[in-house]
Structures are given as structure tokens and as C-alpha cells.
Amino acid sequence: MTRVVVVTGATSGVGRATAHAFAARGDHLVLAARAPRTLAEVRAECAAAGAATVEVRVTDVTEPGAVDALARATLDRHGRLDVWAHSAAVMAYGRFDEVPAEVFDQVVRTGLLGAAGVARAALRHFRAAGGGALIFTGSVLGQVTAPYMSGYVASKWGLRGLVRALQQECRDTPGLHVCLVSPGSVDTPVYQQAANYLGRAGRPPPPVATPQRVARAIVACADRPRREVTVGSANLVMRFGFTALPGLYDVLVGPLMRLAGLSRRPTPPHPGVVFAPNPAGEAVRGGWRPDPVGALRARLGRDNRRRSLRLE
């Protein structure tokens, strides 16, 4: 069955990879994010990947009424809504007392209150329709903590709590599913795009998963819903240390974060994309790990160009 799928946060990282994955399944897509230019790029990518139809809607999930308008437009166009995959989030680095209050608040507003707005709009329709799948992208940082990322950690802990409460409330509608996909480090541009008040640029600590792997887990939840899916080989180890050995965890997490989660590249204080998008920095991957498929495609493209030149 061809589904109608809304993807919020569709222009970068996991959201963009998710849009590609649903497109490859031949679904009808409604893609939403803040950057019109990048949305147009993703629309073309998804059409080429096999989506039945692709629409784009410029949407800031923190703006009052924006998510409701997105839901109404989807229903007006398609008459139904089967899956809503939500990945919109922003990040800020810095000690809590050194991150401007408005930056911290916007990180939480985007990651938690934006997700609550999506849930409100989606569940209103899913309950009336008797079912649907609402899938959130969480984080291992919704289950453990790390220094210098307090706003992001607060938003992801809040998101996990919200999802658990929604799962309990939705038990009276058997066809309605609320899922949480929680990755560890992922090779996306979110680290480069983050606000920074720490003086050192952030990076994903290893091991680093691909956004395509997370996207596959999201599509799998749409096919066969699960309450929560973890993506990342280190997640269980981190959760065990945080829960069973909290004292040791707190001793080690700061040095490990400075060693593996921060680069040596200095950076001046800046708000990143917390308040406005940066289309030039939006992509599926962030370049933190090798991309063998991309490298192969580039190599094949160079070889084809050389053959073409020889023939000419």
C-alpha cells in the first residue's frame, strides 16, 4: 500500500535520509523544514528516488500554528495521513551558564515543544482515522547525560518522557502507534551547524552510525511499529554505566567528551542554526566517517567523464 508520509526536519541529516528511504518505497511524501532552497533540492532527490508524489512545505515547528497548517495542507491534498516522521532538532555547545538563555530556550523549544506540536497535530488526525504511525527521532542523550550540551540533553530527555506518556495514552486505539528511534552518534551536519559558546567545535564521538542506518530503523517502525529502537553499538554500554555506575560515569564523561566529542578547531561564539537555517550546511552526511557509496559514485562519475572525453 502506498502511504502518505510527512517528514519534518527533512532537509538535513536523519530527516533527509528518511525522506530518501520513504521515497524509495514509492510513498507519497510531504516534506517540511525551514529552508525553501534545500527543500527544493530534497524534493528533486525524492522524485528521482521513486516517490509517488512529493510536496514541500516551508515550516518552522516552533512557530505557532505552523504544524497545524502542515497537517491541514496534507489532508486537503491527500485526504489522509498514514505516517509522520519527525526529526527536527537543533543543538548548542557550551557550559549551561555561558549559553545565552535565548539559545538554550530555543534548543528546548525546537526539540521538545516542536515535537509536542507535531504530536498534537498528528494524534488528532490518527485518532479520528483509527490509526497511524508517529515516529520521533530521539537520542541516546535522552537516556544518559553529557556536559556542554545541556539544552539538547534536556530536550531529548523531555522527548523520551513525552513519547512514553503518549504510548500509554494511545493504548485505547490499537492501530495508533507512537515510536521512538534513539541513535547514538550519527554522521550528520548537526555538529557543524550547532550553536557554540565553548570555543571548540563539536564532533560526534565514535562509533559513528550513518544517517541511512537510522532512516532504515524509522521506515521499519512505519512497517512494523515498535515502542523504541536503539541505533548504535555503544548505546547499551553508555546506559549501563550511567545507571549502574553513576559515580564512575560522572568522573569519566567530562574527559571523554573533551577528548572524543570536541575537536581541536577553535570557534568563536555563534548561534549556529538555532534561530535560522543555513542551507549551505545542509546535507545527509556530515563527513565524519568514510562514505564508500559516495566515493564509488564519484569514482564512476569521473571514469564516465574520462570515457566521454576520449570518445570526443
Image (cartoon, helix red, strand yellow):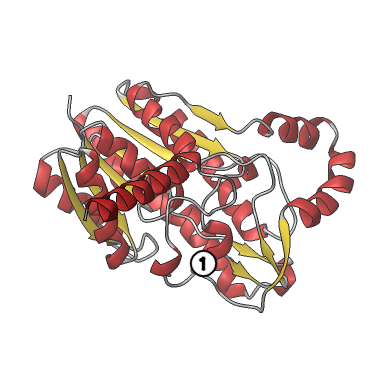
Where is residue 4 drawn, in percent x and y? 20, 37
Q: Name the foreground residue: 80 vs 284.
A: 284
Q: Is residue 190 left or right of residue 27?
A: right
Where is residue 224 drawn, in percent x and y? 37, 21
Q: Name the foreground residue: 232 vs 227.
A: 232
Residue at 70% across / 42% down in the picture? 144
Residue at the spot of label 1: 106
Rendered position, 296 above or below 105: above
Mark 1, secondary structure of its residue: helix
Residue at 57% across / 39% down in the picture? 209
Residue at 53% across / 65% down in the picture? 193
In terms of image quadrants, where is residue 133?
Answer: top left
- The quadrant in which the C terminus is found is bottom left
Q: Mark 1: give few (<14), some (14-19) or many (20+) Cα within 10 Å.
A: many
Q: Is residue 272 left or right of residue 73?
A: right
Question: Is residue 165 visible from the viewing direction of this image?
Answer: no
